[in-house]
Image (cartoon, grey):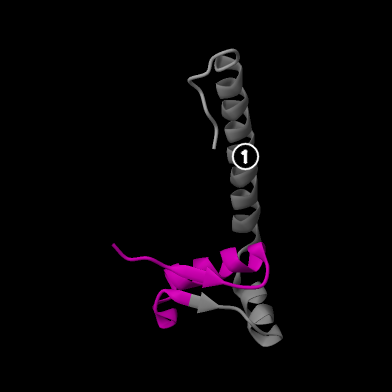
Amino acid sequence: MPVSIGIAPTKTLAKMAFHFAKHYPGYNRCCYIDGDEKRIKALSLYDAERHEKMKQLDQARMRYLTVMQQNDKRMCRGTSSCRFF
C-alpha cells in the first residue's frame, strides 16, 4: 500500500505538501516545504477552492466527533463500566 507524507511548519502547508507528495511522482511520495521559495511555489500551484472544501469537511468531522463523544458520555453516566482514555 503506497503511503505519502507532507511536512511543513504549519498544518495548512503540511496538507499542501501531502497533496503534492500524493499527486506528483517527482516528490517520490514525500514532500517537505521548508523555505520561502518552496512555500511561495506551493501556494501558487495549490487550488484554493479545494483547500476550502477540505477545511469545511474537517470542521464537519470535528462537529460529528464532538457530538458522538458527548453522546457516549451521556450513555455512560452512572455506570462504572465506561472508561475514557
In the rendered structure, which segment of residues is drawn in magenta? Answer: 1-30
Q: Specify the farthest residue to the front.
A: 80
Q: Position of residue 18 (x, y in %)?
A: 51, 67
Is residue 54 shown above or below 8? above
Is residue 15 shown above or below 32? above
Q: Residue at x 42, y 82 (%)?
A: 26
Numbered-mark total: 1
Identify the image quadrant of residue 77.
top right
Residue to which mark 1 is pinned: 62
Q: Position of residue 66 (x, y in %)?
A: 63, 32
Q: Residue at x 64, y 68 (%)?
A: 13
Q: Is residue 11 magenta?
A: yes
Q: Viewer-proximal residue, 6 or 25?
A: 6
Q: Is residue 5 magenta?
A: yes
Identify the image quadrant of residue 69.
top right
Secondary structure at badge 1 equals helix
Q: Residue at x 45, y 76 (%)?
A: 30
Residue type indicated by callout 1: Met
Q: Is residue 28 left or right of residue 45?
A: left
Q: In which quadrant of the rendered image does the C terminus lie?
A: top right
Q: Position of residue 38 (x, y in %)?
A: 63, 83
Q: In which quadrant of the rendered image does the N terminus lie?
A: bottom left
Q: Viewer-proximal residue, 38 or 34?
A: 34
Q: Residue at x 60, y 78 (%)?
A: 33
Local packing at callout 1 (Cα closer than 10 Å; few below 14, some 14-19, many 20+) is few
Q: Is residue 79 left or right of residue 37?
A: left
Is residue 10 shown above or below 30? above
Identify the image quadrant of residue 68.
top right
Q: Specify the farthest residue to the left.
A: 1
Q: Specify the farthest residue to the top.
A: 78
